[in-house]
Image: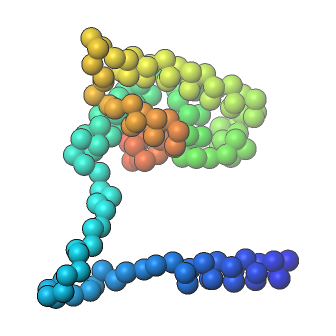
Amino acid sequence: MIRIVLNEALTKLRRQRTAREESLDRDFQSDTDIPPMEVADWSPNPQQLYSAVEFREILIKCLRRLQPTLRIVFVLRDIEELSINETCEALGLSAVAVKARLFRARLQLRHELSAYFKKRDGEPSAIESSDKVNYLEGRSNAIVAGSPIAGA
């Protein structure tokens, strides 16, 4: 086991050595004909920020419409990322009950949220479809972090 870990670490180090790196601190005032290095801006643009805020508000509104028994299971599992067993222990429920409530909560949320994402009069909704896919494929805690939805 130790030898396997050691070999994997050595392989990773060899790969890192071959990676090409450039310093961001190079002299930008030089007179040489070195083209300027382009650095990608990873920060979200204002439209993405607005879409995330708008979607967060829509999601909170839809979560408040859920029954409290369904909402708490959804919040614990999908927002707080607790396991099924941890959710069972926290709520004093069986695993089957947690799974059933989570399924019903997701189904109701899907129904509620679909109204916001349908195209109206041929125009897309305010939240772009790529934002929807990114949210629905990932966890919702990035959008809902810090919101008071569990006790709402």
Tell me if 79 is positioned left or right of 126 in this view: right
Tell me which residue sits at (61%, 22%) in the image: 104
Q: Is residue 28 visible?
A: yes
| Above or below, comparing residue 141 to residue 42 in the picture | above
Q: Quadrant of residue 131?
A: top left
| Above or below, 9 relative to 103 | below
Give residue 61's position: percent from left, percent from top: 37, 27
The C terminus, quarter of image: top left
- The structure residue drawn at horizontal position 23% and vertical position 75%, both measured from the top left corner, is 35
One can see residue 152 in this view? no
The vertical placement of 52 against 110, above or below, is: below
In this image, 90 relative to 76: left or right? right
26 to the left or right of 22:
left
Q: For this rendering, which residue is in front, 42 or 28?
A: 28
- The reply, left or right, for residue 49 in relation to residue 109 is left
Name which quarter of the figure residue 31 lies in. Answer: bottom left
